C-alpha cells in the first residue's frame, strides 16, 4: 500500500491547499436566496416611499405605486419642509425639526453624562446599599410609561415646567436613566479592576479616575448610548405630544399632524417626503458612528 | 527597623473570614514572599496593605505610621499587578508620570524621575509608545517602573510574572532580584509559584485559609517545614509520606520497613505513636551508594519520567507511592529493581493528628 498512499478525490485531483467551494452549492443557494428575499421585503416599502415622494399628484392618482416617476419633482420635499400645514400654521416640518434638535441635544447629553457617572460609581465605588440602589433603578426600566404619565404632568405643573422644552428634557433624562446606567455599569464592570486599583495607588480620585482613565477607554459604550438616546428621543411621540405645547412640538408630533390633517386631497407625496425627513437624523447618527460602534479601545490594557 | 507591621488583621467578606487575626512584621529592606494556593488570602492581604480593601479589624503600620485608614496613595507604597494594569490610552511616559502628576510634582522633577526609572529598567526606547505596542515583558517592566518613579518605601507585587511565558518569567525573576539588591526597598511579593518564592525571598510566609502556616527563610521552609501542609506544598515533585508508628525504641515502623530515627533532630528530643514520615524525592540515594545509607530498601520502578537534567522515578514502598528524583544521566527503565537509600537526618516527621512537625 505504500506506493498508493496518495488519496485521490472523486474528481481525480490530488487534494492540496484550501478545499474548493463551488459557488452554486445548495448551501449557498439557500443562504443567498433567503437573504435576497428578506432584503426585497424590507427595501420595497422604502422604494415606494422614495418613488412616491418624487412624483407629482396627477401621476400618483394613476395608482402605479411601483412605477418610477415619469417627471421627477422635488416640490413635495420643499413643501414638507417649509409649507405643509399643521392645523392653522403652514410652516412645514422645519419648526418641528428645530424643536426636536433643541430637545435632543440637552436630553441626550445630560442623560449620557449622568448615567455614565452613575454607572462608574456603581461599578467601581461600591457603597453601602449600592446594589439595592441599582436594583431599584433597574426596576424603573420595567415600569410602563403610560402608568406615570399623569403623575409627571402634576410634577411638571408644580415645577412650573409644563409645556416647556425644559420639562420635556427633564422627562427624557429621567426615563433614559435606568437602561443607560445599566449599560454603563456593565461596561465599567467589564474593564479590568486592576486598572482602577492602579489608578488609586497612583493617587487619582473619583473624578480623576473617571476623566483620565475610564472616559478615554469608554468610547464604544458612549457611542452605543448615543445611538440609543438619539433614536429614542428623536422618535419619541408620546412625551412630546403630552408635555409640550404646539409651539414646541417635536418633529414626530408635527409629522403626525401633517399626515393626519385632512383638508381637501391627501398629498401622499408630501407625506412620504415628510416621513423620510423625520427619519433622517437617527439614520445619519447610526451610519456615522457605525465604525466606532465596532472598534475596541481597551486593547493593550491588560495581558494579551 | 520594622517597615510594615500588621497587627491582628481580620477581613470578612460577608460571613466569610478571609483573614483571621493575622500578625506579620516585615523588616526594612526585606523581601517577603506570600506563598499559597489560590484562595488562601495572600492577594487579599496585599490589597489590605495597599489600602485597596478596607479591613474588618486590626491595624496596619508602614514605617511606624498607622495607615489603617489612609488612602493607597498616602501609604508610601507602589504596586505591580498581575495584568500589568497599564493605562492603555497613555504612552509609557504618561503611564510613568501619572502618579507624579496627581501628586502635583514640578515638571522638572517628573522628567528626572521618569528618566531615572527608564534607565534602571532599560525602557528608554519605549517611552513614547502605547502599552498596546509592547510585549508582555516590556509591559511588566513599565508596570514596575510606575512603582519605581514614586520613590516609595514599600513595593507590593501581586503575582507579577504569572502572565509571562516560562523563559521570560525566569529572566524577569532575576531582574526583580537585581532590582531589590540595587534599591534595597522593602518588597512584598505574592505568588503561587514556589520557585519564585524560593529564589527571591528573604523570608517566605506560607498561607492557607487566611492563616500564616509558617514564616521562615526559604532554607528553613525547605528543610524544616513546620507542618505537613507546608512540607507537601514546597518541593517539586512533592515530598513522599509514610504513615506509621514510632515505637518505644525511637524507631519508625511502616509495614515491614523499620527506620531508626536516632539521628533525626526531634524538637522535644523524642516522640511516640502515630506519625507521618516525610522524605524528599531528591534526598533519595540509588545504586551502590544506597547500601551505605542508614536505611535501604528494595523497590521496582513503575514509571520513569526522564526530564533531561534529572529523572523522576515512581515506585511503591510498603503500599505508599514513592517518588525518587535522580540524576538524568542514570539510565533507569520501568520494571528495573532499585535499591533505595534514605537518611533519617533529611526526613520530616509530623504528628498524625495535629500534622505539626515533631
Image: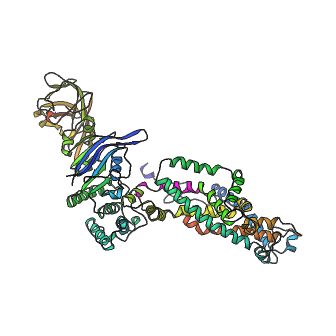
Place of residue A261 in the rendered image (x, y in percent of width and height, measured from the top left)? 84, 66
In front of the other: B286 or B284: B284
Based on the picture, tell me whether residue B27 belongs to the magenta stretch: no
What's the residue at 22%, 47% (across, down)?
Answer: B203
In the image, taking residue B253 as reference, residue A127 lies left or right, namely right
Q: Is residue A249 visible?
A: yes
What's the residue at 39%, 66% (across, down)?
Answer: B133
The span picked out in magenta is: A179-195
Place of residue A36 in the rendered image (x, y in percent of width and height, measured from the top left)? 69, 61
Residue B19 in the image: above or below residue B102: above
What's the residue at 33%, 73% (across, down)?
Answer: B107
Residue A139 in the image: above or below residue A256: above
In the image, taking residue A5 as reference, residue A39 lies left or right, namely right
Please state, as top left, top right, bottom left or bottom right, where the C terminus of chain A lies in the image.
bottom left
Task: Point out the residue furthest to the left here.
Answer: B292
Visual colour scheme: rainbow
Based on the picture, tell me whether residue A193 belongs to the magenta stretch: yes
In front of the other: A240 or B337: A240
In the image, taking residue A170 as reference, residue B337 lies left or right, namely left
Place of residue A94 in the rendered image (x, y in percent of width and height, measured from the top left)? 73, 73
What's the residue at 59%, 61% (across, down)?
Answer: A111
Place of residue A241 in the rendered image (x, y in percent of width and height, measured from the top left)? 74, 62
In terms of secondary structure, what is the magenta stretch mainly? helix
Q: In the rendered image, which quarter is residue B253 located in?
A: top left
Amino acid at each position: 500500500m505504500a506506493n498508493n498512499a496518495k488519496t485521490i478525490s472523486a474528481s481525480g485531483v490530488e487534494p492540496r491547499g484550501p478545499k474548493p467551494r463551488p459557488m452554486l452549492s445548495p448551501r449557498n443557494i439557500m443562504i443567498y436566496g433567503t437573504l435576497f428575499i428578506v432584503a426585497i421585503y424590507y427595501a420595497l416599502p422604502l422604494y415606494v416611499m422614495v418613488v412616491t415622494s418624487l412624483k407629482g399628484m396627477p401621476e400618483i392618482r394613476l395608482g402605479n405605486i411601483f412605477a418610477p416617476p415619469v417627471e421627477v419633482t422635488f416640490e413635495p420635499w420643499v413643501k414638507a419642509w417649509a409649507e405643509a400645514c399643521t392645523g392653522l400654521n403652514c410652516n412645514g416640518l422645519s419648526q418641528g425639526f428645530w424643536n426636536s434638535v433643541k430637545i435632543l441635544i440637552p436630553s441626550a447629553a445630560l442623560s449620557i453624562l449622568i448615567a455614565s457617572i452613575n454607572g462608574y460609581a456603581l461599578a467601581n465605588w461600591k457603597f453601602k446599599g449600592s446594589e439595592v440602589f441599582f436594583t431599584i433603578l433597574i426596576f424603573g426600566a420595567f415600569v410602563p410609561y403610560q402608568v406615570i404619565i399623569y403623575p409627571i404632568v402634576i410634577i411638571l405643573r408644580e415645577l412650573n415646567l409644563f409645556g416647556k422644552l425644559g420639562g420635556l428634557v427633564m422627562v427624557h433624562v429621567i426615563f433614559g436613566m435606568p437602561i443607560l446606567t445599566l449599560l454603563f455599569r456593565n461596561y465599567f464592570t467589564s474593564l479590568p479592576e486592576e486598572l482602577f486599583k492602579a489608578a488609586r495607588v497612583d493617587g487619582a480620585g473619583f473624578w480623576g479616575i473617571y476623566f483620565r482613565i475610564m472616559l478615554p477607554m469608554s468610547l464604544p459604550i458612549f457611542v452605543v448610548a448615543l445611538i440609543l438616546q438619539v433614536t429614542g428621543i428623536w422618535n419619541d411621540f408620546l412625551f412630546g405630544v403630552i408635555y409640550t405645547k404646539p409651539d414646541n412640538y417635536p418633529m414626530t408630533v408635527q409629522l403626525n399632524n401633517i399626515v393626519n390633517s385632512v383638508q381637501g386631497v391627501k398629498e401622499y407625496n408630501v407625506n412620504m417626503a415628510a416621513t423620510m425627513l423625520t427619519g433622517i437624523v437617527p439614520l445619519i447618527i447610526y451610519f456615522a458612528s457605525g465604525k466606532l460602534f465596532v472598534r475596541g479601545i481597551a486593547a493593550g490594557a491588560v495581558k494579551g | 527597623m520594622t517597615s510594615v507591621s500588621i497587627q491582628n488583621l481580620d477581613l470578612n467578606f460577608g460571613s466569610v473570614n478571609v483573614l483571621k487575626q493575622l500578625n506579620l512584621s516585615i523588616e526594612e529592606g526585606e523581601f517577603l514572599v506570600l506563598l499559597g494556593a489560590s484562595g488562601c488570602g495572600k492577594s487579599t492581604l496585599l490589597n489590605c496593605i495597599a489600602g485597596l480593601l478596607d479591613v474588618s479589624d486590626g491595624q496596619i503600620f508602614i514605617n511606624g505610621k498607622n495607615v489603617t485608614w489612609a488612602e493607597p496613595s498616602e501609604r508610601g507604597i507602589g504596586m505591580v499587578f498581575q495584568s500589568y494594569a497599564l493605562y492603555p490610552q497613555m504612552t509609557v511616559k504618561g503611564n510613568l508620570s501619572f502618579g507624579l502628576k496627581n501628586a502635583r510634582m514640578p515638571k522638572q522633577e517628573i522628567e528626572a524621575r521618569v528618566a531615572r526609572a527608564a534607565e534602571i529598567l532599560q525602557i528608554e526606547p519605549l517611552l513614547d509608545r502605547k502599552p498596546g505596542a509592547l510585549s508582555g515583558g516590556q509591559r511588566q517592566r513599565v508596570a514596575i517602573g510606575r512603582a519605581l518613579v514614586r520613590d516609595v518605601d514599600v513595593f507590593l507585587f501581586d503575582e507579577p510574572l504569572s502572565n509571562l511565558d516560562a523563559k521570560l518569567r525566569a529572566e524577569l525573576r532575576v531582574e526583580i532580584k537585581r532590582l531589590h539588591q540595587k534599591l534595597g526597598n522593602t518588597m512584598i511579593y505574592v505568588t503561587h509559584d514556589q520557585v519564585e518564592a524560593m529564589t527571591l525571598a528573604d523570608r517566605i510566609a506560607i498561607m492557607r485559609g487566611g492563616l500564616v502556616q509558617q514564616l521562615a527563610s526559604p532554607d528553613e521552609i525547605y528543610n524544616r517545614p513546620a507542618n505537613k501542609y507546608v512540607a507537601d506544598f514546597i518541593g517539586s515533585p512533592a515530598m513522599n509520606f509514610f504513615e506509621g508508628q514510632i515505637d518505644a525504641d525511637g524507631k519508625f515502623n511502616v509495614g515491614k520497613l523499620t527506620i531508626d530515627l536516632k539521628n533525626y533532630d526531634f524538637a522535644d528530643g523524642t516522640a511516640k505513636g502515630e506519625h507521618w514520615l516525610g522524605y524528599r524525592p531528591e534526598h533519595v540515594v540509588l545504586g551502590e551508594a544506597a547500601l551505605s545509607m542508614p536505611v535501604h530498601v528494595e523497590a521496582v520502578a513503575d514509571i520513569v519520567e526522564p526530564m533531561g537534567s534529572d529523572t523522576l522515578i515512581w515506585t511503591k514502598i510498603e503500599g505508599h507511592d514513592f517518588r525518587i528524583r535522580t540524576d538524568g544521566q542514570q539510565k533507569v527503565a520501568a520494571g528495573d529493581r532499585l535499591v533505595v537509600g534514605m537518611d533519617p537526618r533529611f526526613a520530616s516527621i509530623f504528628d498524625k493528628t495535629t500534622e505539626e512537625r515533631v
